[in-house]
């Protein structure tokens, strides 16, 4: 039997199955530097130990999305090596801050399975969790992914489609954000005067800037997360696929959009939860990514007067500036749209 | 009103204005590793904690130019987001060593303004300073930059052109260099036997090697500094500009030339000041950068027998080796020249 | 006389000569992050401080090949700046673990010289050693390299061809691996259940995945090691050479193959020795690298019941998947083969 990992196929999964993933990963200031170099993040809390300490963190925490990508990367060899498409995310919550030096490992529970009518593929629902070395949970999220069957004649596991919330309840947000000393939060240093009260549901913000993605950049990012999905790295194989190109990891677009969103959301320093997200179309190297956001809702957090939550929709596009907030076109998605992400970010009150 | 930063236009500045810049940035060994990977720096003092400790530093200091780029990057959103051209630098002094873990923030004072005769643009002179978390000043420099007016009819601020020194006075150099134990300085490990006494004013050195620049490299470098100037990252927009290409950050050329200069100036380990510099022509990805240097002058430092100062002109070129020291051609600059930089470097005596 | 380093030519070497190399280099978590981003290494011991501590390391050690590349890089300016070809390696032993914060320097002894019949070149044999700041030896290896003569009429040094072992004796392996607590080694977290007893001499493993190399990636890697060999960085000069392209550092292929080999050899966490290696053909950017391995032999280590040694041949190819283990073709090497590497890796028993 081959010692190389062929990944799991649809018929290999069982609802209720727990999967402990390889490889544990210590996140360091080296990873943070690379993340900054690749995305140009500028949120002050994550950029500056001094700023973070002033407001109540022990030091600058690791960017939330870097933590997400590291956890996601670990799940790939077991969950999505034979995936055709990543269909969605739900109920993603950041539960504890991660600091340089922390070690992350990941566990997934299979929470649902549904064979497709073609009988060639099925949908696997997993709840993945990232843990720190002390056993505390840093992150959990649900994703569902379409996975190939190895043997089309294999009997499918019983159908079970989990009920998933449309949004993360605002009252559960904030576990990864310690109490913030807002009097010490320097809005000039942070890059914007705008706080919770300055945003209203319905506000739309063009993030203006565009950033062109190179093959070396997305490969380095995705390897940094130890994500082994083949389609991101192997041009020889990709040349024979329908796109003919290496497909860029969807999470790369999320991080680019988040970094661009600084320009208009500079104080929305912490992604507390992701309600859902859709990779509307694929991104390839050489294209330029733009983004805009809309405030979908606002919420106060029980017992916290320091920070409030903005529910944001951030939309990323390719080769398409966003002064007019592109999203839908006749008959469906605007063809320039890459990503439609719905999340909660915390911002000082 | 848009929450996205549109940057300042010429008519928004006032002489005497102080601008505190976002975002504070903790510089780490991760940043240092990326800087090394992007430029191939080999100066022993910055490369080795052990070497640095032996001669009197508490550990290896961060490369001077990395500090410069980080400070410069912070000034971009406020000073030069609407710039047409970076015209010059003067009186740049490195005042304190920066070590991994230090947090840098930046402040600029507007020290001069002059509208151009077209009335469409004006020149903004700023003195920018980089501070460490303890309030000590690590760096200051003057730059002047041509900035668009938003409204051509806006009344210009009063003209004021500051007097700027041609060179930094040698007697003021060395604050960022602790006393060096020259007996402990291992010239073999440092890569060259040549010290202060081995260089003479007028000496010219071809640095021999050439290095080709890739889009991913200059984008990663420039984002590492949190420099948001759009022309470096956005191929979609650049395609419609006069060059049709992303323009590489001028500071990238400075760092490439400095790294190349190791080959001939291996012991000139510390850039103490930059007298002036001119970006003679633009650099684009795919071109190969070469460099040569001339010793313009030498200076002893008051009260210091450990190090002396070499005033160096380092010239960088594109697709043009430098055995014959290209600089001028008939009627002006040699078209291969990218950079003409005038600075003081310290070297053991 | 030029202060730039022209490198040594064949006639400059003498058997018995000791060369201390510049530049000492402190290896940091920043370097480790870049190495991960460039190669996607996933061996648990090097990836996780927590995992490493559990089994007996004080923290995660630096990847063995990163140490090798750093030492190799230091030797380039003195040994191989005027090289035509890197001919081989022998007797490479890893002697002490390297941790982030350790400073590496390198020394080479010339152990043999042989002029070629053309009298234009000669072969230089060196034993290079990497030392840590405390004087302990982390690594040693022999390589031989064909070097140009500067003056074809220069009298050659006396011929001396050293006797080199075909393999490193298994009983000398393991100095860089502390005693491992195998009861605490979590095979699920490490990514595979397979241990020493599960491999047999003769086993062949296709590592399945392929990875496409970009110019920015190999340049960043090679500069990270402060390797100054010109052919890797200078497209302007390369355009006039026989390949017309920048040649990728052979060590880049070794690291890519090693990272790919995780898929099938996940617990072979430590490269203890390299018996020999051959760069069969050159690699250029844009090509996709695949790999397969064969178990050549197995060995127990005297006095150690924790780990055993697998002697592995790992073969890397370009644009050629390896389900049929390509190596030779009619009349010689398979033209797709890049690398044929013979080494000892340690794996839990």
Image: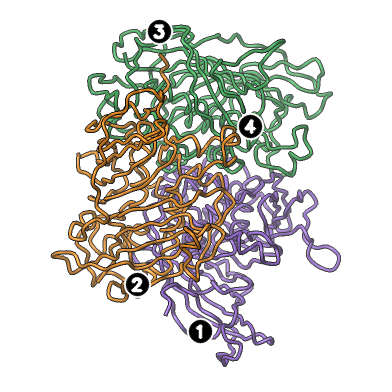
Chain colours: A orange, B purple, C green
Q: CA distance from mark 3 to mark 2?
A: 68 Å
| Residue B81, position as x, y percentages in the image | 54, 71
Decide which of tag 3 and tag 4 comes sooner along the chain.
4
Image quadrant assignment for residue C241: top right
Marks 4 and 1 in Cβ contact (< 8 Å): no
Q: For the residues tagged 3 and 2, is the chain the same?
A: no
The residue beneath circle 1 is B12
Residue C200 marker: none
Viewer can see residue C98: no
Q: Secondary structure at mark 4?
A: helix
Q: Secondary structure at mark 3?
A: strand
Which mark is in front, 3 or 4? Answer: 3
Which mark is in front, 1 or 3? Answer: 1
Front residue of this view, candidates B148 and C31: B148
Q: Secondary structure at mark 2?
A: loop
Quadrant where the image shows the N terminus of chain A: top left
Q: CA distance from mark 4 to mark 1?
A: 56 Å
Q: For the residues tagged 4 and 1, is the chain the same?
A: no
Disc 3 crowd, CA 10 A, few/some/many (<14, 14-19, 20+): some
Front residue of this view, candidates A125 and C186: A125
The residue beneath circle 2 is A202
Marks 1 and 3 in Cβ contact (< 8 Å): no
Q: CA distance from mark 3 to mark 4?
A: 37 Å
| Residue A327, position as x, y percentages in the image | 46, 63
The residue beneath circle 4 is C78
Q: CA distance from mark 1 to mark 3?
A: 75 Å
């Amino acid at each position: 039997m081959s010692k190389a990992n062929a990944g799991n196929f649809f018929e290999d999964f069982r609802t209720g199955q727990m999967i402990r993933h390889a490889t544990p990963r210590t996140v360091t200031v080296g990873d943070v530097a690379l993340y900054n170099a690749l995305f140009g993040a500028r949120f002050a809390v994550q950029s500056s130990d001094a700023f973070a300490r002033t407001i109540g963190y022990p030091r600058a925490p690791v960017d939330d999305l870097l933590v997400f990508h590291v956890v996601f990367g670990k799940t790939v060899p077991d969950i999505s090596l034979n995936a055709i498409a990543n269909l969605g995310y739900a109920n993603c919550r950041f539960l504890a801050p991660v600091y340089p030096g922390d070690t992350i490992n990941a566990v997934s529970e299979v929470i649902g399975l549904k064979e497709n009518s073609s009988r060639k593929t099925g949908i696997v629902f997993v709840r993945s969790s990232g843990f720190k070395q002390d056993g505390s949970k840093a992150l959990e999220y649900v994703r569902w992914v379409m996975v190939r069957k190895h043997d089309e004649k294999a009997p499918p596991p019983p159908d079970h489609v989990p009920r998933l919330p449309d949004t993360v309840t605002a009252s559960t947000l904030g576990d990864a954000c310690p109490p913030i000393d807002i009097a010490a939060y320097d809005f000039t240093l942070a890059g914007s005067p705008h706080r919770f009260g300055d945003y209203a549901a319905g506000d739309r913000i063009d993030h203006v800037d565009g950033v062109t993605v190179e093959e070396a950049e997305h490969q380095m990012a995705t390897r940094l997360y130890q994500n082994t999905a083949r389609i991101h790295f192997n041009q020889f194989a990709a040349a024979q696929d329908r796109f003919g190109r290496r497909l860029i990891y969807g999470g790369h677009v999320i991080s680019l959009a988040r970094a661009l969103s600084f320009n208009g959301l500079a104080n929305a320093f912490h992604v507390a939860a992701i309600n859902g997200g859709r990779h509307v179309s694929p991104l390839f190297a050489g294209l330029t990514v733009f983004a805009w956001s809309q405030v979908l809702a606002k919420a106060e957090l029980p017992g916290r007067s320091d920070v409030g939550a903005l529910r944001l929709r951030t939309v990323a596009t390719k080769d398409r500036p966003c002064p007019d907030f592109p999203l839908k076109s006749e008959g469906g998605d605007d063809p320039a749209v890459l990503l439609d992400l719905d999340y909660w970010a915390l911002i000082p009150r």
